[in-house]
């Protein structure tokens, strides 16, 4: 069954600190896709990254980096040198190749960056 | 701006009533997804349409229905409203029929409050 768990409901860090958001997923499919979305206070979800199950290379985009480990079924997201503008709710999501009709979202992690 | 337009942005109504939420997808996108976001359930997939046809159903109640019109805009109809239907309803669009082939572009959501 498809499932995404974001155990951290809410995190607060002081600006410029690094922070990692955890994501653990469950799937029976061998081909699947993982996503991270950001929901700022304005409400609109914004796509951050898509990773397929065959590509375990870590990815870095500016201050954002993602660590995909199939062995632990995790797809963690790290923000380096956090900024107040990073305050948002972050969702991890999963889509299976055999069920490509939908993306299943975790419950999200609310991140507060304190000035 | 994602290019996805949802109306109305806010809606307050009473139990037992019926409302219609409207979504205009990004230009060129053929797929429309509807999601419900509530505090306790997180982001729940409701239904997907692709080029006018229903493609997938998620946790959509029988009191809810949707359709996608020839011009590709979509409407989500919610009837016999209950207090528990109060939530943020998101529409998202994508180019392809499968959710896992690319990112979803989300609208700003329609916040429904049932009193």
Image (cartoon, coloured by chain):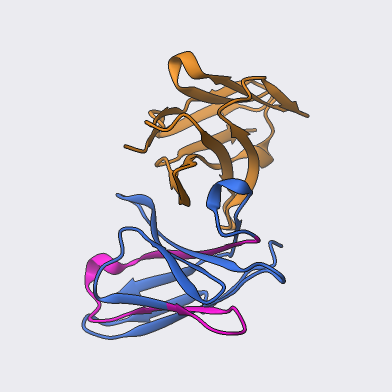
Q: Residue shown at 27%/86% (left/top)?
A: B17
Q: Chain letter for orange, please.
A: A
Residue A3, given in percent of the width and then of the height, sits at 36, 36
Residue B86 is inside the magenta segment? yes
The foreground one among B71 and B88 is: B71
Residue A33 is inside the magenta segment? no
Does B43 sit left or right of B73 as displayed? left
Residue B69, given in percent of the width and then of the height, sits at 53, 83
Residue B15, given in percent of the width and then of the height, sits at 22, 80
Question: Magenta residues?
Answer: B67-95
Can you see residue B115?
no
Does A38 sit left or right of A16 as displayed? left
Residue A81, given in percent of the width and then of the height, sits at 71, 23
User: Compared to A41, does B95 lie above or below?
Assistant: below
Q: How many marks?
A: 0
Instruction: Name the image quarter holding the C terminus of chain A.
Output: top right
As drawn, the residue found furthest toward the top would be: A71
Q: Chain letter for blue, please.
A: B
Q: Quadrant of residue B36?
A: bottom left
Does B19 sit left or right of B94 as displayed? left
Can you see residue B91?
yes
The foreground one among B25 and A53 is: A53
Q: Residue shown at 54%/37% (left/top)?
A: A33
Q: Residue shown at 44%/79% (left/top)?
A: B67
User: Compared to B88, does A105 lie above or below?
Assistant: above
The foreground one among B63 and B10 is: B63
Instruction: Name the image quarter holding the N terminus of chain A.
Output: top left
Q: Quadrant of residue A50?
A: top right
Q: Quadrant of residue B28?
A: bottom right
């Amino acid at each position: 069954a498809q499932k995404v768990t974001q155990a951290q409901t809410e995190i607060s860090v002081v600006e410029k600190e690094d922070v990692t958001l955890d994501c653990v997923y469950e799937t029976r499919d061998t081909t699947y896709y993982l996503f991270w979305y950001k929901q700022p206070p304005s409400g609109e979800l914004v796509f951050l990254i898509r990773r397929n199950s065959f590509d375990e290379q870590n990815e870095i985009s500016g201050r954002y980096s993602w660590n995909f480990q199939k062995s632990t079924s995790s797809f963690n997201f790290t923000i380096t040198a956090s900024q107040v503008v990073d305050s948002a709710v972050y969702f991890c999501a999963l889509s299976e190749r055999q069920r490509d009709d939908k993306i299943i979202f975790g419950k999200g992690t609310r991140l507060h960056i304190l000035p | 701006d994602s290019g996805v337009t949802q109306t109305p942005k806010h809606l307050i109504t009473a139990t037992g009533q019926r409302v219609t939420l409207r979504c205009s997808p990004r230009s060129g996108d053929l797929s429309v997804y509807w999601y419900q976001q509530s505090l306790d359930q997180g982001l729940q997939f409701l239904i997907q349409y692709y080029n006018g046809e229903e493609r997938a159903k998620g946790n959509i109640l029988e009191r809810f229905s949707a359709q996608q019109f020839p011009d590709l805009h979509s409407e989500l109809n919610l009837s016999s409203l209950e207090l528990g239907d109060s939530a943020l309803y998101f529409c998202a669009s994508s180019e392809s029929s499968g959710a896992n082939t690319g990112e979803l572009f989300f609208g700003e959501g329609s916040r429904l409050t049932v009193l």
